[in-house]
Image: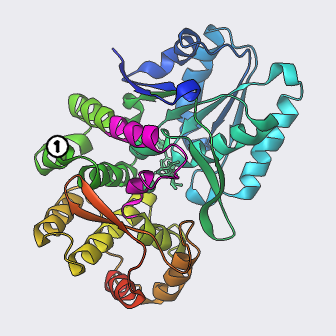
Amino acid sequence: MLSRVDVALGSRSYPILIGSGCLSAAGSLFRSHGISQTNAFVLTNPQVGSLYFDTLRHSLTEAGFQQVVRHDIPASEGGKNWEEFSKTCAALLEHFPDAGAAPLVVLLGGGVVGDLGGFAAAVYRRGVPFVQIPTTLLSAVDSSVGGKVAVNFGGVKNIMGAFSQPRLVLCDLSVLRTLSPRELRSGTAEVIKYGVVCDASLFELLEGPALEKLIALDPETLIQIVTQCVRLKAAVVEQDEFDKLGIRNVLNFGHTIGHALELSARYTLTHGEAIAIGMVAATNLALRLQLCEPTLLESLTQQLTRAGLPLAHQGHPELFDPAVRALQLDKKFRNGKNLFVLPVRPGVWKQAEDLPWPMVHEVLMETLQ
Ligand SMILES: NC(=O)c1ccc[n+]([C@@H]2O[C@H](COP(=O)([O-])OP(=O)(O)OC[C@H]3O[C@@H](n4cnc5c(N)ncnc54)[C@H](O)[C@@H]3O)[C@@H](O)[C@H]2O)c1
Ligand SMILES: [Zn+2]
């Protein structure tokens, strides 16, 4: 049984199929959803590829894909760079030089594979079709949906990229069982993010045992929460696909300080850990501005703690200067100001671009001391 969420974007619409054990049916699902390419280029990494590539290849071959090429990038954020992007494009060109045989690009992995590979698919021959097969909780609930594809460059996160929607997202929840506990917790940060700024009912749900059940990978809870999160993401993307109207900014809750920490700590924090800390910092800013009640910060910190996520990156005051520099290089840094998404109450948020630097610095310092 597959649960299905549609992302309605006119001619760029696509389905998100969510189930357990569906990787082995990937090829036939692609075919039944109108994907007709003869060849496939699978981007993955050594870790995920060793676990799941054979199953995927078998299903593709059974569904009539003739040439199935695998290309690996390193299994970490450090690999989401221009060099690996360029090597991926070179592999595409090497294996598929004939314009008549352009492959389906299949992205088998977490957000790093999805972001880098989606960007390569977006620009190779001005765009070849791609599908996302997210294998982390984070990529299942967030990065595989919405068409933001990118690599890090020049010390800035996601600065080289494009908007390019996948043809389909296939989410096999059974693959999450091989995730390390740290990566699983990391994904819950984005789930908690949706609860705080997008959906009071999800926030309420996570106040109860559903959070522990999610981390224990209870099948019913997992499918319920992943489906709810992708519905929320789809709704935001449908309203503001190209991030022009300010609506999509909601997804950046926790990401302004989070991205700065991720970069300045040189990826020793996972994306989800950095975002957890960033959400606490943003809520602290909202409190100082009297935008939210202290109880919101309490609930958020409790949810993050129950999920085993950090609230700060204490003992690292030396990261203050690099983090300030990273803030000034943020993709959304404009006219000398950072964009902050501040929570008001569950499901309600406000954006602020005019926060006084001393206040931001103070909160950042608290995070690092
Ligand atoms: N495009 C977007 O809209 C968007 C949204 C959120 C995050 N992101 C990006 O996503 C990235 C983070 O993604 P992530 O958290 O998935 O990290 P990741 O892709 O680095 O994966 C984390 C680790 O888990 C391993 N792994 C993946 N699936 C596994 C499995 N099933 N079993 C065992 N190990 C597995 C990977 O090899 C890797 O070591 C960041 O670069 C972030 O910027 C993008
Ligand atoms: Zn994120």
Report x, y in % for residue 315: 36, 85
Left or right: 366 as drawn, with respect to 68:
left
For residue 80, say whether it is visible: no
Whether 68 is drawn above or below 145: the answer is: above
Read off the residue under disc 1: 201
Position of residue 343 relative to residue 161, above or below, is below
x, y percent for residue 257:
42, 72
Residue visible at 48% across and 36% down in the picture = 134
Q: Nearer the viewer, residue 207 or 179?
A: 207
Residue at point 74%, 24% (across, down): 103
Q: Quadrant of the N terminus?
A: top left
Residue 41, x across and y down, in percent: 71, 29
Q: Quadrant of residue 6?
A: top left
Q: Quadrant of ligand 2?
A: bottom left
Q: Tell me if residue 254 can be seen.
A: yes
x, y percent for residue 350? 31, 63
- What is the magenta range? 229-254
